[in-house]
Image: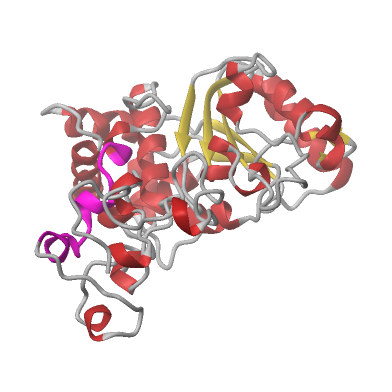
Amino acid sequence: MTERESFIDYLSRRGISRRGFLGFCAVTASALALPMGAARTMAANLAAAQRPCVIWLSFQECTGCTESLTRAAEPTIESLILDQLSLDYHHTLQAASGEAAELARQNAIDDNFGSYVLIVDGAVPTGEQATWSTIAGQTNLDMLKETLDGAALVIAVGTCATFGGVPAAAAIAAERPNQSGAKGVGDLMSASEVPERPLVNVPGCPPVPGAMTGVIAHFLAFGTPPELDDLRRPVAYFADTVHQRCPRLMHFRNERFALAFDDEGARNGYCLAKLGCKGPKAHNACATLKWNLGTSFPMLSGHGCLGCAEPGFWDRTLAPEGDRFLGSAFYPDAPPAA
């Protein structure tokens, strides 16, 4: 897309009709719980929006967040929202390497200081272990500090960038604790280890693509992030638990549970509570937005929720049996476990 081409013209060139664009704005405004008339405002603002500069930093991560957020099986409006951005630096996707790559990041900072969007995925090692992850001879922590300075908005993508995730997990054996000092972006801001900037957390392992594009669409249309909860997650996507939106909820209420992943209950779609599903304490939009163009999500595919969008994910996933669901301790209204 050229700088002079409108977003509407760009969508038309990619085979998306104005009706389809307006439909996307209506659905997105509804998902974000915006007031009546907001869809029309969003459509007008998005259509006129200029391409914001985006700098995407990847630290201690597995590239799963990039895979989730940038892969599209066909040109959807959600994927085109990502095309609407001027992605000026991304370790995995950029063609440049070495000095040319770092020069591109510096130029993006200098040319757009105070107005660019910074997306971060992956945790950041700190303290004496800051050197455990470096890029171009610079620690992740120093690169984050430097790039945060001129950011208008920071979006932490994935549970590693939001809450520390797998890199921050405690070792199973107490005598071998995690030494990385890995932290999420919000924790670093709260500890004054990096500059404080407007921050939106979109956790998940990986995060749901629709939640990410909704945050971006809101920022493009209104210049501000959507309403956030106390963990800085978008309320529209993370207010409800996975349990509340699960298609197996009626089986839970009628005390129909699968007791093994291949038993008759599992084949009949019964509730997975007694197999360790963490849906009641997990807040995410996967049950409504789903993955792969709305095809499926874990419970629809026969696997319980791992709570991947919550703080402490991984430690709770691998916790001893006494800390897992065994009845009322995890589900206050659950019948006793068999």
- On the rendered structure, is 162 left or right of 246? right
Q: Is residue 280 visible?
A: yes
Q: Position of residue 55 (x, y in %)?
A: 63, 35
- Residue 247 falls in which quadrant of the image? bottom left
Q: Is residue 72 magenta?
A: no
**Which of the two residues, 292 or 235, is positioned nearer the viewer here?**
235
What is the magenta range?
A: 237-253
Q: Is residue 179 left or right of residue 39?
A: right
Residue 157 rendering spot, x and y as whole percentages: 52, 41
Residue at x-position 22% and y-position 58%: 246
Q: Is residue 135 above or below residue 113?
A: below
Colour scheme in the image? secondary structure
User: What residue appears at the point 47 percent right and 34 percent down from the top-left corner?
Assistant: 201
Q: Main secondary structure of the magenta part?
A: helix
x and y, in percent, of residue 182 in the image? 70, 36
State whether residue 16 appears in this view.
no
| Camera-nearest residue between 160 and 76 | 160
| 4 displayed left or right of 101 | left
Q: Give above or below for 51 relative to 169.
A: above
Q: Name the residue at 10% across, 28% down.
A: 36
Q: Is residue 135 above or below residue 53?
A: below
Q: Between residues 317 and 219, which one lies in front from this camera angle? A: 317
